[in-house]
Image: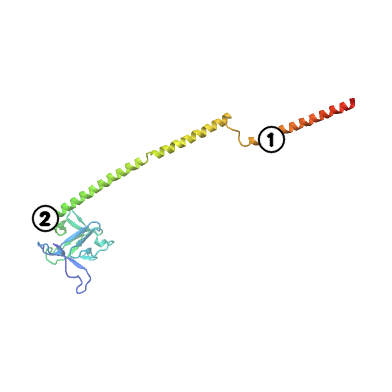
């Protein structure tokens, strides 16, 4: 099976780079170097022994564990369910065992161009690293979590519907709105009535009519004074005529 070497590729130097190699399957499940996990978001294949490292395709097509780099095309792998091959998404080369000694412990694992007639060296069987009972428990928990999450979304939808309904109710007129509306209508009616009365002449004259009335009063006073003067002149004529006759 595929596994990570435990010895640094460049030992005695400590570079943190480890070869990908073939090893005999350990049925006890106690060797984390033989376990891998895939992160779909990263498109990267991690190793349980070195979880911060991922499978990396070198320029010489050799496979090794290397520090994860989000933008590294050398680390982008996917599994083809139909052909049962691991392949690099950018080079399209597939993970392959050595043709001469494919199952030898410690044999190198590299990438090669896919050849249907050499499929036996390219194909891999995915085997769960978990205990069957633990795996079943995990799957049940994931299903329960998914159900709870779906239920939470339904509750959120119901709450949203309720909030929308409350917003619609808030648009309806309340008692104070009705009273204000009546006041506005009453004021409008009074203004209309006042306009009609003015047109009919039932409303008092505008302020300028005061000046006109005052002017008429002055004209009337002036006529009375002239009348008195005329009467005085007439009386003087009469007195003059009487004096002459005597």
Q: Quadrant of the C terminus?
A: top right
Q: Residue at x 31, y 44 (%)?
A: 163
Side of 230 where 141 appears, left or right: left
Element type where label 2 sits in the image: helix
| Residue 205 image offset from top left, x and y in percent | 61, 33
The part of the image, by quadrant, that contains residue 70 is bottom left
Crowd tier of the residue under label 1, counting other residues whose Cα lies within 10 Å: few below 14, some 14–19, many 20 or above: few
Element type where label 1 sits in the image: helix
Residue 215, numbered label? 1
Q: Residue at x 49, y 35 (%)?
A: 188
Crowd tier of the residue under label 2, counting other residues whose Cα lies within 10 Å: few below 14, some 14–19, many 20 or above: few
Side of 213 where 88 appears, left or right: left
Which is nearer the eye, 112 or 198? Answer: 198
| Of callouts 1 and 2, the N-terminal one | 2
Residue 162, numbered label? none
Q: Residue at x 80, y 30 (%)?
A: 232
């Amino acid at each position: 099976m595929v596994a990570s070497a435990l010895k640094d590729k460049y030992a005695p130097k400590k570079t943190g780079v480890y070869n990908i190699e073939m090893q005999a399957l350990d049925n006890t499940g106690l060797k984390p170097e033989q376990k891998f996990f895939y992160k779909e978001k990263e498109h990267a294949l991690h190793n349980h022994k070195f979880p911060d490292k991922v499978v990396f395709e070198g320029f010489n097509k050799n496979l090794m564990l290397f520090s994860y780099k989000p933008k590294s095309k050398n680390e982008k792998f996917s599994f083809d369910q139909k052909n049962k091959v691991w392949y690099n998404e950018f080079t399209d080369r597939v993970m392959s065992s050595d043709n001469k000694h494919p199952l030898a412990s410690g044999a190198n694992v590299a990438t090669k161009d896919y050849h249907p007639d050499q499929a036996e060296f390219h194909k891999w069987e995915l085997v769960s690293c978990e205990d069957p009972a633990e795996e079943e428990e995990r799957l049940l928990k994931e299903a329960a979590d998914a159900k709870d999450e779906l239920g939470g979304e339904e509750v959120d939808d119901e709450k949203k519907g309720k909030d929308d309904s409350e917003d619609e109710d808030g648009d309806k007129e309340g008692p104070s709105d009705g009273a204000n509306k009546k006041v506005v209508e009453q004021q409008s009616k009074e203004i209309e009535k006042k306009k009609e009365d003015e047109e009919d002449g039932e409303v008092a004259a505008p302020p300028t009519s005061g000046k006109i009335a005052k002017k008429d009063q002055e004209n009337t006073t002036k006529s009375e004074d002239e009348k008195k003067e005329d009467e005085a002149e007439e009386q003087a004529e009469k007195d003059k005529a009487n004096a002459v006759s005597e």
